[in-house]
Each structure stands twice: as C-alpha cells, then as structure tokens.
Amino acid sequence: METDMLVCLLAIAAAVGVVALAAFLFRRLVEGTDDHAPNGPTANYAGSMLSSLFLLVFAIAIVVPWTTADAARQNTNAESQAAVEAYWSASRLPAPAGAQVQQQVRDYVGFVVHKEWPLMASGQLSPEGGSRLDALRNQVAGLTVTGDDAKAAKSDLLDDMKDISAARRQREADARAQPPAGVLPLAIFTGLTVILFPFLAGARPRGNALVPLTLMAALLGFGIYLAWHITHVFDSGLSVGPDAFQTALSEFQRIPWSG
C-alpha cells in the first residue's frame, strides 16, 4: 500500500513537472501568444479533459458496484435454488433420514434469512452457517441407504449440497467485495474540480450563467451520493435482499415431506 501511494505521488509530481517544464521551455524557445482568457484554448482543452476524466472515474465508481450487486443477486438465486433442489432430493430418501435432512435444509435457509443476512451488511458471514452446512453434508455422506432410488437420491442430494456450499463461498466473497481503492475519492475530487474549473480559469459567472453551473453541481453531488450508496452489495439502498431465500422457504411448503 505504501509503495502504491509513493508511485501515485511520484506520477502526480512527474505530470506537474512536465507541465512546468513545457511552459518554461516553450516560453523561452518557441514564439507564441499568452493565453489568459477563461475561454481560451488552454482553458477549453483542460476543461474538456477534466470532464472526460471525471466521467471515466464516475463510470467506474457506478459500474463496478452495480455489476457486483447484480452478480451477487444471481448467486443468491443459485444458492436458494440449490437448497430447493436439496429439499426435493431429501424427499426421496427413506424415513426418517429424509425428513431429518429436509428439516435441516429448512433450518439452514431460515438461519440465512433471519440470522446471517443482517451480518452481511458489515461484510461477513456467520461461522455458524458454515458449520451447519458442513454438518449436514457429513450427515448426508454418512447415510446408509439401499435400493437404486434411494442411492440415486443420496447422490443427487450430495451434488445439491456441493452447489449450496459453492454458492455460499461466493456469497461470502460478494459480502466482502469493495470497489477499487481510491475510485470514490478520486470521483469526488474530479467532480469538485469540474465544478470549480470556471472560477479557476478566471471566469466569474454572474446571473443566468450560475443557473446551469448550479444545476450541474447538484447533479454531480447526487451522482457521487449514488456511487457511495451502492459501494456495499448488502448494505445500501440498492442492496441485495434475502428475497430468493424467502421464496425458497415458501417453496418448501409445496414439496412432499419425506416419510
């Protein structure tokens, strides 16, 4: 981290140094016209480049969390569907093992909805959830069944448990996901620079000229707020909720009870 910061500072210093050196050399060696006007070529060029830089950084700050949230939503659907399939597979096992497994699958999904989901807002999953899933997988693996149908049901159930475990690991990674470091601060900095640029270039907006500038500042502020608001997949106004798991709990009601 310290090395990255040092490289960043050196890059900034080098860029500023290039501008200072170019200004000195061109003033001494090349004939030209001094540019003091707020709407001169220097201000126009710098303004367009700053706007482009802001749009690039702002797009990253919005698109990356949005994409992560969309992937997390699809993953929760996959995990909940795997739980439903496991419930179906358990219904094909002989009693009382099938009913016990069904109850544990139901308990696991209920635990995710009511106990684990609130913890995910802080970027973590409950160790108890993983322990429940591991215990259930071990229990299924240790079942002794006879008959082709029961053996096929056990095999399918183990595959379903494997899918649940894989989706859970991905959900844990989604809960910990964060946008690239520095993107949001850079978006804020470039946004402020774009707003203040006319004043920095020497212009002094008055009257009606302040209206579009004020409107732009308000929209940029709202955009920055939106980018900050979706930085965490499970803790924002656009966060992923436990809807898929709640739907799974409802689907359990229509699946036959083993035994």
Image (cartoon, rainbow, N blue to C red):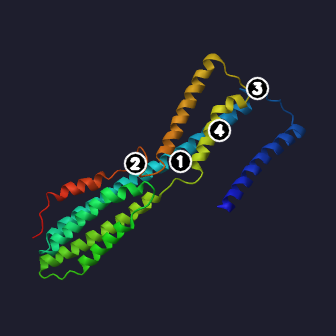
Label 3 element class: loop
Quadrant occupied by the N terminus: bottom right
Label drawn at residue 37? 3
Q: Disc 1 and disc 2: Cα gap in Å?
A: 18 Å
In the image, residue 205 sits, relative to residue 27, either above or below, namely above
Q: Position of residue 213 (x, y in %)?
A: 60, 26
Please give the label number shown on residue 50: 4
Work out how far the residue at label 3 is from the one at label 2, CA to CA, in angstroms. 47 Å
Q: Secondary structure at mark 2?
A: loop
Q: Earlier in the sequence, mark 1 or mark 2?
A: 1
Q: CA distance from mark 1 to mark 3?
A: 33 Å
Q: Amino acid at mark 1?
A: Ile
Q: Quadrant of the C terminus?
A: bottom left
Q: Earlier in the sequence, mark 3 or mark 2?
A: 3
* In this picture, residue 220 sits left or right of residue 150: right
| Residue holding disc 1 | 60
Q: Nearer the viewer, residue 226 or 194?
A: 226
Residue drawn at x 53%, y 40% as measured from the top left: 224
Question: Callout 1: helix, strand or loop?
Answer: helix
Q: Which mark is residue 239?
A: 2
Residue 60 position in % (x across, y down):
53, 47
Name which residue lies at 46% across and 51% down: 232
First in residue order: circle 1 vs circle 3: 3
Figure quadrant of residue 143:
bottom left
Viewer-closest of 56 and 235: 235
